[in-house]
Image: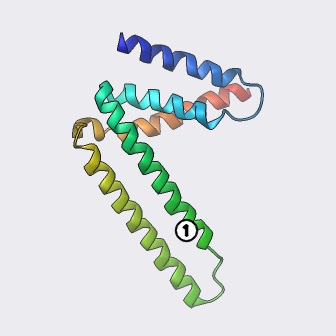
Amino acid sequence: MKNLITFLVLAIVPGFILAQDDGLPESDQIRAQRGAYITQRLKLSSQEAAHFWTVFNEYEERKAALNAEFRRSFSRPSTEAQAEQLIQRRFQQEEDLLNLKREFYQRLKEKVPAMKLALISQAEREFRRDLLRQLRQRRQ
């Protein structure tokens, strides 16, 4: 039954996205489609999915905040000292993102097996590829 529901969500949501008349699909619809795709691809149980999406959404928010903070402080360097400072800030941002990712995996592995967590990056790449393919087909 769970597989049937997941299949229906995966089959119906792209239709809603493609049926829109204006521009790109809304982010809520993409987020719902992405959630269904990753949940199905990782074969998460309902308990695993609840924990996964709680932690994952928090991770995404914190990651976006770190990236936004870096973009706000970015300015084109006009001196060597400013360029060096920019490079050092970028290294710090990358370290912060890596630490955030480590924390994310530590929290997730409390309730989701590592075998499933290892597939997250692949599932996200596949989802983006499929979404881009759908958007290209829509434009034709």
Q: Position of residue 108 (x, y in %)?
A: 28, 44
**Three-letter residue code for mark 1:** Phe
User: Which residue is painted at 25% across and 37% down in the image?
Assistant: 112
**Quadrant hosting residue 138:** top right
Q: Position of residue 77 (x, y in %)?
A: 63, 82
The residue to which callout 1 is attached is 70
Q: Quadrant of the C terminus?
A: top right
Q: Quadrant of the N terminus?
A: top left
Left or right relative to 10: residue 98:
left
Q: Position of residue 110 (x, y in %)?
A: 22, 43
Location of residue 58 with respect to 24 vertically, above or below:
below
Q: Nearer the viewer, residue 21 or 138?
A: 21
**Quadrant hosting residue 117:** top left
Name of the residue lying farthest toward the right: 22
User: Which residue is painted at 52% across and 83% down in the image?
Assistant: 85
Can residue 44 be seen here? The reply is no
